[in-house]
Image (tube, helix red, strand yellow):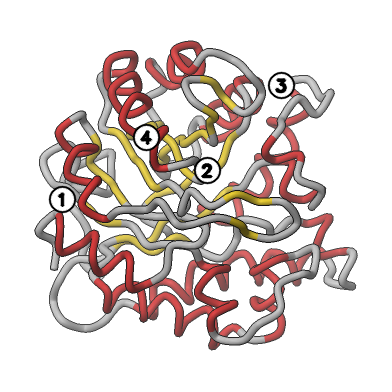
Amino acid sequence: MPTSTEPGTGLPLPEAVLVTDGGMATALEARGHDLSDALWSARLLLDAPSEIAAVHRDFFAAGADIAITASYQASFEGLAARGVDRQGAERLLRRSVELARQAAPPDGRPRWVAASVGPYGAVLADGSEYRGRYGLPVAALRDWHRPRIEVLASAGPDLLALETVPDVDEAEALVEAVAGIGVPAWLSYSVAGERTRAGQPLADAFAVAADAPGIVAVGVNCCAPADVPAAVALAREVTGKPVVAYPNSGEGWAGGWTGPSRFVAADARRWIELGARIVGGCCRVGPAQIAELAAAVGRR
């Protein structure tokens, strides 16, 4: 699969605007899968990998340039609880990258694979990924993330998606964990207004990545669409780097999704005006919405 010839990024940034996919779990649920397991969509790396590949194909067909792997909630601890040993867990992490790579259509259009690195809170499966403040020092978080990152990097993704990061401590740990890994990364926070989910000012959060050479883009994901414009502008101002923005639908969560979707594909044009170069969707954003977004930004 062709990739950018620009050294050091793996993506044609900052010139191009690229579309990333939507919610893997959303699309899997639409295909009839129950994801109430603690492994969430990563469970299907074990039970139904062909379904993950099918979702990647659907998003590529919708106009996505980038596939984010199903490794967000895959961890050594979580897989061990399902009886998967260390070697087996490494194989599943690598499989997540392979499935995304193999799903790219042979149409000559460049596609890229971003290996998802979810936050520490995701393995806890208790919602703490949206709160942060785990009570662990930066060094402990770095040491927890690094082995999984090393395995994902060994599978040859085009970049790493350090995503849904809830606080500055974890961002610092992730920036340290990817140092010298040999694969570029983007860093995206889950936010509430102009603060991280843990309550820190976004200016401080984005500053963590400003001088990190391995971080080629910064931004937000799995936030309300209304939070995107200010965050994109601030990320660009603080870091000078290309910005990534892929919010959720804007529906509320209270043990289940409530309220109307507020995801409007045409809004991505404004995000791009403010500095976004990778745009897409997260939870509750499916292939149909990504097709609308890709058309709105001229990628379809």
Q: Nearer the viewer, mark 3 or mark 4?
A: 4
Q: Secondary structure at mark 1?
A: loop
| Residue that lies at the very extreme toward the front in this rendered image | 259
Circle 3: element type: helix
CA distance for labels 2 and 3: 17 Å
Could you tell me how many numbered marks the image carries?
Answer: 4
Given residues 241 and 88, the one toward you in this image is 241
Q: Which residue bears the numbered disc 4?
A: 228
Under mark 1, the amino acid is: Thr
Q: Quadrant of the N terminus?
A: bottom left
Q: Quadrant of residue 297?
A: bottom left
Q: Looking at the picture, which amino acid does disc 3 mark?
A: Val
Of the numbered discs 4 and 1, the one sitting upstream in the chain is: 1
Q: SS class of the residue under badge 2?
A: strand
Q: Report which residue position mark 3 lands on.
A: 138
Determine the CA span between mark 4 and mark 1.
Answer: 30 Å
Q: Nearer the viewer, mark 1 or mark 3?
A: 3
Residue assigned mark 2:
163
Relative to 226, 272 lies left or right: left
Dot placed on the residue nearer the N-terminal end, 1 or 3: 1
Among the two numbered marks 3 and 4 on one chain, the one whose residue lies closer to the N terminus: 3
Query: Residue 220: image x %, image y %?
Result: 44, 36
Q: Nearer the viewer, residue 35 or 85?
A: 35
